[in-house]
Image (tube, rainbow, N blue to C red):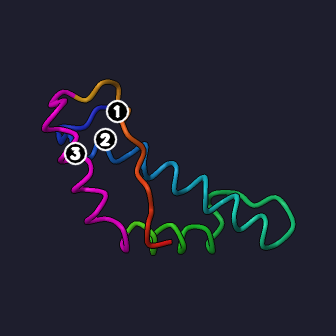
Amino acid sequence: MNHPDPIIALEIPLIRKIIRDETWLEGERRGCLVVSWDPVVQERVCKVVLRVGLEMMGSVTAQMAFDPVPSGGSTHAPFIDRAA
């Protein structure tokens, strides 16, 4: 998916990781398989993105200073959620 905003293109893989992590974590809490569109998972993903969004944007913006053209939406350094 192409986005006119390169920041969004770089943030998408980070948000996908948050979704995977929260889906797995909720499955561990419940002791069963949970889907990513589960309302609890969606709420937790929103809370994480709201909590770390500014740091995530800063990380992506700093990366763009070194690599202004996103290479397939991947990032050079993974985002680390220090607040979690």
Q: CA distance from mark 3 to mark 2?
A: 5 Å
Looking at the image, residue 70 sits to the left or right of residue 25; the answer is left
Residue 36 x/y as whole percent: 63, 57
Label 1: which residue?
Answer: 73
Residue at the image point whose x is 42% and y is 44% from the top: 78
Magenta residues, as a range?
50-69
For the residues bearing labels 1 and 3, Cβ distance under 8 angstroms: no
Which image quadrant is residue 23 in? bottom right
- Which residue matches tag 2? 10
Q: Is residue 54 magenta?
A: yes
Q: Amino acid at mark 3?
A: Ile
Overall secondary structure of the magenta stretch? Answer: helix
- Check disc 3 and report the residue beneath it: 7
Front in this rendered view, residue 8 or 54: 54
Q: Position of residue 40 (x, y in %)?
A: 63, 74
Give the left or right position of residue 37, taking residue 57 as reference. right
